[in-house]
Image (cartoon, helix red, strand yellow):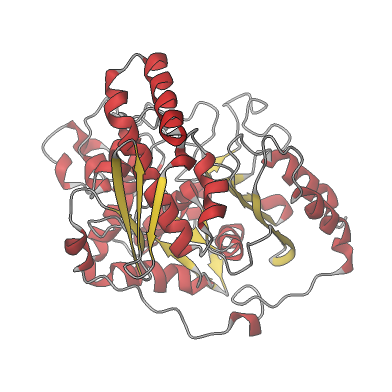
Amino acid sequence: MKKFLRIFLWTLLLLLLTGLVGVWITFPPVMSGMAAKTVCSCYFVSGRSLQNIKDKELQVFPGLDQATIEIDEQAQTVTASILFNTKKAIYRNGLGCVLLSERSEAEIRKQNWKRPTAPLVNQDTVAWPMGNLYTIDSAYAPLQRVLNEAIKEKNPEQPANTSAIVIVHKGKIVAERYASGISPQTPLMGWSMTKSITGTLIGMLVKEGKLNLSGPAPVSEWQQDERKNITLTQLLQASSGLDWSETYFNPIEDFHQMFIYKDDKGGYAASKTLKHSSGTFFQYSSGTSNILMRMVRQQCGDDRYLSFVYDSLLYKIGMYNTTLEQDASGTIVGSSYGFATARDWARFGLLYQQNGNWMNENILPKDWVRFASTPADAAPKGEYGAQWWLNAGEKNNDANRTYPALSTQLFSAEGFEGQYVMILPEHELVVVRLGVSHAGYDIEKLVNAVIQALPK
């Protein structure tokens, strides 16, 4: 009864604050869907305990941790119930979890997707960056103290819940720390850092000559109306002009409609109409990233799709412990559902810090990193490039930037609740921080402390 009352009061409060009757109808299903999908992924992909997930991820909204959770180990499913609304997520080996919505479980289980097998290599016997063997010079002793302090909890009322930190300097791991229960082998949710992986796959198709940055985006639904003029660059730079709401706290907006109710997330986003002239308005959009990932699938074809993603990119750079979850239509959720170990996220950052070169092979087009880290014309503070966050600052006033104490050259992959891959080219530095920080995380402070602790 207490559990029911708590959820009821939270729902009623939200209803009163917004004045939207629709919230009463849509809030519980969205919450139960979030709970089912989150628990499924964190339990089956990350291998964490239900209690640990409740203590961290399910604290994001009041009452979410009170959802009734049932885990079926044999069927590998998770159901979550809130106020008589039940949602179910299913796990598929190698493919991650998917929330049931439009298709049945039987239909999804029948799909013939098979993720390529990672190379049979014991990474603990191979030198970094393809493996995990590394040694740390004593000159980095001050950095060890910085990370010892960074992993500690300072405020029990608003815990940072830092899960992992990895520092790569001049191509080498020079420090790393993990929270209790998290190891170097634990895949952790990157949330929107997945967008930067999606952008990378687009770059690889540009290198192959399959896509043209300046040409119209190849989206079949747009060919008979004004959306046909949206370019691939505008999609990458979140400047397409499509009508989109990235609001996380209103269950009737696009973000939750796509994630909770739609099997084909890229298709849903592609159905949106034009609201602004393309190229003139910056709108950070998970929908756009899912359009891009659907484009990757269409350009590769289903026979090559997962091989391209895993063999040509992830496994190529040693990201053997990474899972990019697919939606019920078979397309990877390129906006949000990437799980990788902290070291794998560091490898991804290192690829960009090395200008797209890996072990003397140019994986990305020659000028891709420069393009990806060039501000979109429509981004008012120079804060976004091609699926990467930037710190360039406002035109003619770069003091007005996201991280004033950090360089304008900084670019980063960033995700919900404090996921970061920070790349500082002038320092040959990659900083990875993963966690579950509901109140935000001061990544600027951490990166500054890391820079100050580097050998002079």
Q: Nearer the viewer, residue 57 or 148?
A: 57
**Residue appearing at x 38%, y 51% in the figure:** 37
Q: What x and y, as percent, mark residue 376? A: 46, 36
Quarter of the rendering containing residue 83:
top left
Q: What x and y, as percent, mark residue 171? A: 68, 66
For the question of whether residue 244 can be seen, the reply is no
Q: What x and y, as percent, mark residue 19? A: 34, 13
Quarter of the image containing the C terminus? bottom right
Most distant residue in the left direction? 224
In-image side of 442 versus 256 (left or right): right
Quarter of the rendering containing residue 135:
bottom right
Q: What x and y, as percent, mark residue 103? A: 18, 54
Most distant residue in the front direction? 1
Picture mark count: 0
**In the rendered image, the vertical position of residue 51 relative to residue 418, given as above or below:** below
For the question of whether residue 59 can be seen, the reply is yes
**Residue appearing at x 18%, y 63% in the figure:** 106
Quarter of the image containing the N terminus? top left
**In the rendered image, the vertical position of residue 431 relative to residue 139, given as above or below:** above
**Residue appearing at x 81%, y 49% in the figure:** 149
**In the rendered image, the vertical position of residue 433 relative to residue 75, given as above or below:** above
Q: Nearer the viewer, residue 24 or 269?
A: 24
**Residue appearing at x 42%, y 43% in the figure:** 67
